[in-house]
Amino acid sequence: MEWINFRHLYSFWMVKRHGGFLKASQEMHVSQSTVSEQVSLLEEYLQEKLFERTTRSMHLSEAGIRLFNFADEIFQKSREINRIIRDGEGGREPLTLKVGIVGGVSRNLLYRAFHGFLNQSDDLKLEIINGAFEELLQLCGNFELDFIITTQLPHGKDVLNFKTKVIEKSPLCVAGKKKIIKKLTNDKSKPQKIDAYVFSYPFRHNDFESRLNKTFPHSFNYKLETDDISLLRFFANSNEGVAILPEIGVLEDVQKGDIEILKIPFTEDLPFYALYHRKTMHIKEVEDLIKASFKDF
């Protein structure tokens, strides 16, 4: 039986991990030409191109993605062997799952979901990476993230590559200090415009703002639109207006009595999703984590 050359595989793995041949060669303390030759020999052995190169960028091919998935597992096991056998450390090294968080996801949701699970698990760690949806989806597609928490769904060919699970639903609400909420609902004598800071999400109705203006005695002066729930939570507590956002984003403030909320009757609950690649190396751990952290869904 012919065996794969692990030195060549290691060079390929390092190129992907460090984002290029030059950085990989510097980390490995060899010449760039040596790394390039070893990757070429690996491609020749496998009869597959592992990288797709353009004038501006370099990405893994389909075969490269599959191979990197295996290589990552192989070299993680290698580190564990060194730790246990060579260094004499007992027990299994905790697995680190890399989680991408899109800006529109509530930190209340994340804390509530992960806090209890992590306190009960000694063999799992999380590494959180924040970013835009398309950026995180690409990282997950290249197996640089294990899963993503987001308010958006993949589209096009990505639909076939990713598994999707609804992990939470939250109604939209109008949130603000008690005095402002009271004025918004009761004081009809002098209609005013109240400053509003609005959550932006992909499937919002085109007539959302006009319908919202008809729901209350006063209309809104829309000052800002963002998918950052944490920022909207700040505005809800600022006494300068109201924030229109998913209720889960201000749940803690409502429970403490810091702010009050009003339901918006014509909107559907906003879903939050967990997305992960169908071929991810840690698919069992990802699914176990999602199941344990989001039990209601």
Image (cartoon, rainbow, N blue to C red):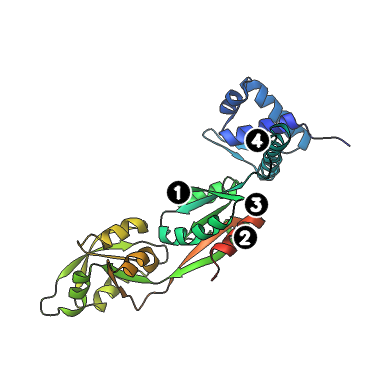
Please give the residue where the numbered disc 1 appears in the rendered image.
130
* Kind of residue at disc 3: His
* Kind of residue at disc 2: Glu
Q: Position of residue 197 (x, y in %)?
A: 27, 61
* Kind of residue at disc 4: Trp
* Kind of residue at disc 1: Asn
Q: Is residue 200 above or below residue 51?
A: below
The Cα atoms of the two marked residues, 1 and 3, are separated by 20 Å
**What SS does tag 1 mark?**
strand
Please give the residue where the numbered disc 2 appears in the rendered image.
287
Q: Quadrant of the N terminus?
A: top right
The Cα atoms of the two marked residues, 4 and 3, are separated by 18 Å
* Residue pictured at 26% horizontal, 78% vertical: 215
Please give the residue where the numbered disc 3 appears in the rendered image.
282
The Cα atoms of the two marked residues, 2 and 3, are separated by 9 Å
Please give the residue where the numbered disc 4 appears in the rendered image.
13
Q: Position of residue 213 (x, y in %)?
A: 24, 74
Q: Is residue 130 above or below residue 13?
A: below
Q: Quadrant of the C terminus?
A: bottom right
Do the numbered discs 4 and 3 sit on residues whose CB atoms are within 8 Å? no
The Cα atoms of the two marked residues, 1 and 2, are separated by 21 Å
Q: Relative to 268, is 86 on the left or the right?
A: right
